[in-house]
Image (tube, rainbow, N blue to C red):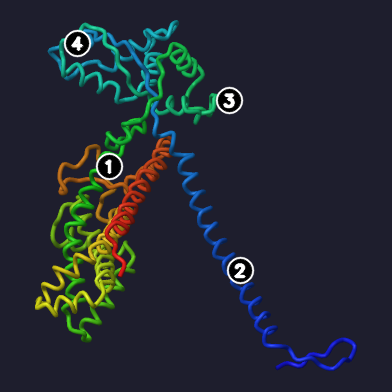
Amino acid sequence: MTDISNAHGAAPRRTTSSELVAASLKRRRRKQAYLQGVGLGAILIAFLMLFILVASLVSTGWQAFTQTHVTLDVYVDPEEIPAERLPRGGFDDALAASLGRMLPGTDMSDRGTARAVEGILSNGAQFELRDRVVADPSLIGQTITMTVPVSDPFDQLNKGLIERETPEVNRRVKDNEVAWFDTLAANGAISKPFNWGLFTNADSRFPELAGLKGALVGSFWALLTCFLISFPLGIGAAIYLEEFAPKSRLSDFIEVNINNLAAVPSVVFGLLALSVFIGWFGLPRSAPFVGGLTLALMTMPTIIIATRAALKAVPPSIREAALGLGASRQQVVFHHVLPLAMPGILTGTIIGLAQALGETAPLLLIGMNAFITSAASSPFDSSTALPTQIFIWADSPERGFVSRTSAAILVLLGFLVMMNAVAIYLRQKFERKW
């Protein structure tokens, strides 16, 4: 016990055990409160960073989910679009003439004015008119109503991304063009519906026409290839290592290397795919199949580790009971252990595929960042993927691709959240507590 003297020189008093315990409890509670505060602060900081990230993406990318359109009454002039020349014809001139009739006082006989009026419309408008006339040549000589997208500068003007107060010299849209656009808006010809083209169009050099269809299809083929290769091979390797392989230096060496492969940077797998799959095997460049093979190499260690952990989580009593009833080792694994471990295996697989969906470096090295204007019809066709499409748009000089880059990131994050939500659902639905 400890002797303590008071301030007046009185006889020392011994500290009781209860006082020592109380002081110790106070210290421990202070440390516990400090630790809890640090942990809560870390969580709040993490959520704050996540909120800033998502808020910045939403504030920049929400504009890309709408697209400015103009509604026109287009006269399909037989002189500009003769039936015998289809699919050729002056479709752009027909659209410009129809738009000029909606702008009183505009001299469409002046070539410069006509080209400026035509610049209000997107380059894809003439192809929409062409497709309609080719599908139904009887439209020649008639007036049809069309709603077509405007070009990117006028789309940004309508969305407030181009400030009208900016001097004309520094503005992409001239004063007379702003006046034309205001006239169209006053006549009710301008609308801003949801931009379905962001999901139904492939890539384009025109921001108002660029979409994610090619990237979505390419990611689908790459993930399908990745799943079909990594899932059976990963589970088979994990079952052998955990249930059948004898404990030896060889098995320990394999286990250590699998753990090391899970930490290898993704760019290394991209270099491997470039030299082996494309260089040695001669597989097509920019193909989702090659991307899927590369992602399978990256995902397989994660699936093996997750599968082994799920197999270890099954109680030994299950194995012992099955063996006691006369089941073989193979029957024990495939009839009892594997079904019970499948929720954990599926969870690890989905998380591994979600990680593979967001990988960019290996896909860039195998050429999946090419400018592709159509969706791949098979895993061997040239294609892009969502991460590489984001890289392409982020590197584009046009200002219209800024919002589309953020929108594409939001779409990618949405898929990642969905895949992780499915993993959580499967774990909670099929998980058993022993």
In this orientation, which residue lies closer to the viewer: 36 or 54? 36
Image position, residue 58 (x, y; %):
46, 41
Against 241, residue 234 (above or below) is above
Answer with left or right where residue 234 lies relative to residue 164.
Answer: left
Which residue corresponds to mark 3? Answer: 165
Against 337, residue 8 (above or below) is below
Distance between the Cα atoms at labels 1 and 4? 35 Å
Distance between the Cα atoms at labels 3 and 2? 55 Å
Image position, residue 409 (x, y; %):
39, 45
Location of the C terminus (image quadrant): bottom left
Distance between the Cα atoms at labels 1 and 3? 36 Å
- The image quarter containing residue 132 is top left
Distance between the Cα atoms at labels 2 and 1? 56 Å
Amino acid type, mark 3: Glu
Label 1, residues with CA under 10 Å away: few <14, some 14-19, many ≥20: some
**Which-is-in-front pick, marks 1 and 4?**
4
Which residue corresponds to mark 4? Answer: 139
Against 432, residue 107 (above or below) is above
Which residue corresponds to mark 2? Answer: 33
Q: Compare marks 1 and 3 and give the one earlier in the sequence.
A: 3
**Which-is-in-front pick, marks 2 and 1?**
2
Image position, residue 396 (x, y; %):
38, 41
Q: Can residue 271 be spotted in the picture?
A: no
Q: Residue at x 49, y 31 (%)?
A: 161
> Which mark is on residue 371?
1
Amino acid type, mark 1: Phe
